[in-house]
Amino acid sequence: WYSWDYDSEASLSWLVQGVEEWIEVSVIIVSGIIYIIVVIFLIITRKKFQEISNYAQEKRILIQAAVITIYCTILNVTWHNYSLFLPDSKWAYMGLNFMWIYNSGINPVIYLILNKTVQDKVKVLSKKSTAAVSTKMKRLKEQTRLAWTNTNPTSGDL
C-alpha cells in the first residue's frame, strides 16, 4: 500500500512517533483552551463588541480559525490512532491520506465560504475570466470563419 508511515524497523521510530503525537496533542489542547477563553470573553463583553462596526467580520474570522483547528484536531487524532477504529486495509490508508490532502485545501475553502472579501475577489476574477474566455471564443470563431472562407471561396459564410 502506498502511504506515508513511520519506519517501524528504524531504531528510534517509535520515539519520534510518540514525541510528534504528544507535541501535536499539546498544541491542540492549548489552542482549544485559548478558543474557549476567547469565546467566554466575547460572550461576557458582547454588548461592547456589537457596537464595533466589524463585529460580524471578527466573528467570521473566529469561526474560520475554529473550524480549521477542529479539522486539524480530527485529522491528527485519526492519523495517530486509526488502528483503534479503522480496519487495516488499503481503503483506510487511502482515506487517511485523502484527509492529509484535504488539509492542504481546507483553508481556501473555509475562507471562500466565510470571508466576504475573498468572495468578492473571486466574483470579480470569475467575471473577468468569463469575459476573457468569451472574447477569445468570439475571436477564434471569427478566425475560423475567415480561414474557412479563404480556403473555400465558393462555400459562402458559415
Image (spheres, helix red, strand yellow):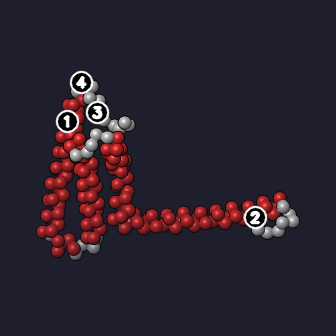
**Element under disc 2:** helix
Return the residue at label 1. 18
Alpha carbon distance from label 2 to label 1: 68 Å
Return the residue at label 4. 11
Q: Earlier in the sequence, mark 1 or mark 4?
A: 4
**What's the residue type where badge 4 is placed?**
Ser
Question: Horizontal and vertical percent for residue 103?
Answer: 33, 50
Neighbours of disc 3 within 10 Å: few (<14), some (14-19), many (20+): few
Alpha carbon distance from label 4 to label 3: 11 Å
Question: Horizontal and vertical percent for residue 40?
Answer: 13, 64
Return the residue at label 2. 145
**Element under disc 1:** helix
Q: Residue at x 42, y 67 (%)?
A: 120
Alpha carbon distance from label 2 to label 4: 70 Å
Return the residue at label 3. 6
Alpha carbon distance from label 2 to label 3: 61 Å
Q: Earlier in the sequence, mark 1 or mark 3?
A: 3
Question: Horizontal and vertical percent for residue 59?
Answer: 25, 66
Question: Horizontal and vertical percent for residue 140?
Answer: 69, 61
**Element under disc 4:** loop
**What's the residue type where badge 3 is placed?**
Tyr
Quick check: marks 1 and 3 in contact, CB under 8 Å? Answer: no
Q: Residue at x 29, y 68 (%)?
A: 57
Is residue 146 found left or right of 9 in the rendered image? right
**What's the residue type where badge 2 is placed?**
Arg
Marks 2, 3: nearer the viewer: 3
Q: Quadrant of the N terminus?
A: top left
Neighbours of disc 4 within 10 Å: few (<14), some (14-19), many (20+): few
Q: Nearer the viewer, residue 141 or 86?
A: 86
